[in-house]
Image: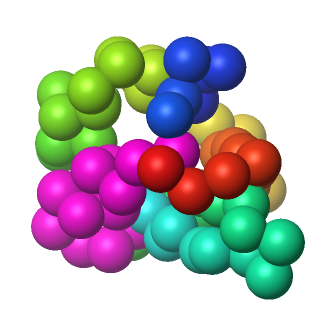
Amino acid sequence: MVDDTCIDCPVCHNVCPTDAIDRQIQDDGGVSLLLNLSACTGCMACLRSCPPQAIHEQPEWLPAAFAGPILLREGESVM
């Protein structure tokens, strides 16, 4: 889970060893963070590396969450 203190920086995407977090720049300059749970190993590199500590562990997921990317955040501007 990503809270509102997220600054839309690329750190979580950059430190993920399995590319489970996808950071997409939108045409309007916004940023979307998507999580592919099937690629996530639970290493918590994203959580430990987040500058504003905006990422929080979610220990349980519904089975449907593994079917495709989950939108974690849509930001308004790129840092």
Can residue 22 be seen here?
A: yes
Using the image, determine if residue 8 lies above or below residue 21.
Answer: above
- Quadrant, the N terminus: top right
Image point 32% across, 50% down: which residue?
Answer: 12
Is 8 on the left or on the right of 77, as rendered? left
Scheme of colours in the image: rainbow
Report the residue that reaches farthest toward the bottom. Answer: 27
In the image, 72 versus 61, the foreground residue is: 72
In the rendered image, residue 46, in percent from the top left (x then y), is placed at 27, 42
In the image, 33 versus 75, the foreground residue is: 75
In the rendered image, residue 26, in percent from the top left (x then y), is placed at 74, 75
Report the residue that reaches farthest toward the right. Answer: 28
Q: How many marks?
A: 0
Using the image, determine if residue 25 lies above or below residue 1.
Answer: below
Is 75 on the left or on the right of 18, as rendered? right
Image point 56% across, 56% down: which residue?
Answer: 78
Indicate yes or no whether the magenta region holds residue 9. Answer: yes
Q: Quadrant of residue 15?
A: bottom left
Indicate yes or no whether the magenta region holds residue 26. Answer: no
Magenta-colored segment: predominant secondary structure? loop
In the rendered image, residue 39, in percent from the top left (x then y), is placed at 39, 70
Q: Quadrant of residue 49?
A: top left
In the image, 70 versus 2, the foreground residue is: 2
Using the image, determine if residue 48 lies above or below residue 72.
Answer: above
Can residue 67 be seen here?
A: no
Is 75 on the left or on the right of 13, as rendered? right
Image point 27% across, 27% down: which residue?
Answer: 51
Image point 62% across, 37% down: which residue?
Answer: 61
- Region of the chain picked out in magenta, as a range: 8-20
